[in-house]
């Protein structure tokens, strides 16, 4: 995902992925519609091989994706 500003990773199965966003709870991350806790964002255990689609919603998304989406959401 090198083309998305603030998202980095070394790819591959079991690769490390991170999303910059500052303090806890500013960007929500959902995998298959299930919200992931902030700790899961830091551990970055998810690989990129089976990834079919990423949706990035910029700006406040708290009305549609909950209180942890003040800076946006990654689906």
Image (spheres, grey):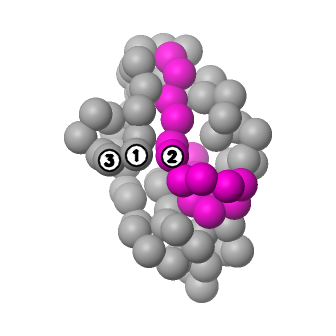
Q: Which of disc 2 and disc 1 is earlier in sequence? A: 1
Disc 3 is placed on an element classified as: loop
* Mark 2 residue crowding within 10 angstroms, few (<14) / some (14–19) / many (20+): few
CB atoms of marks 1 and 2 within 8 Å? yes
Tag of residue 20: 2
- Residue 16: image location, x then y, percent: 53, 21
- Residue 66: image location, x then y, percent: 67, 74
Question: Residue, x 60% and y 53% (percent of image)?
Answer: 22
Question: Residue, x 62% and y 63% (percent of image)?
Answer: 26
CB atoms of marks 1 and 3 within 8 Å? yes
Question: Is 43 a magenta residue?
Answer: no
For label 1, the residue is: 6
Above or below 3: residue 66: below
Disc 2 is placed on an element classified as: loop
Q: Nearer the viewer, residue 42 or 66?
A: 42
Label 1 – label 3 distance at C-alpha: 4 Å
- Residue 28: image location, x then y, percent: 60, 59
Label 3 – label 2 distance at C-alpha: 9 Å
Q: Residue extending furthest left?
A: 3
Q: Nearer the viewer, residue 32 or 69?
A: 69
Q: Residue extending furthest bottom?
A: 63
- Which quadrant of the view contains residue 68? bottom right
Above or below 3: residue 14: above
Q: Which of disc 2 and disc 3 is earlier in sequence? A: 3
- Which quadrant of the view contains residue 8? top left
Region of the chain picked out in magenta, as a range: 15-32
Q: Left or right? Give the position of 55 relative to 39.
A: left
Is residue 49 something that shows in the picture? yes
For label 3, the residue is: 5
């Amino acid at each position: 995902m090198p083309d998305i500003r603030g998202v980095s990773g070394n790819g591959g199965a079991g690769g490390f992925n991170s999303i910059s966003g500052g303090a806890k709870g500013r960007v929500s991350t959902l995998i298959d519609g299930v919200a992931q806790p902030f700790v899961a964002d830091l551990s970055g255990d998810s690989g990129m091989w089976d990834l079919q689609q990423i949706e990035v919603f910029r700006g406040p998304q708290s009305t549609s994706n909950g209180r942890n989406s003040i800076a946006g959401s990654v689906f």
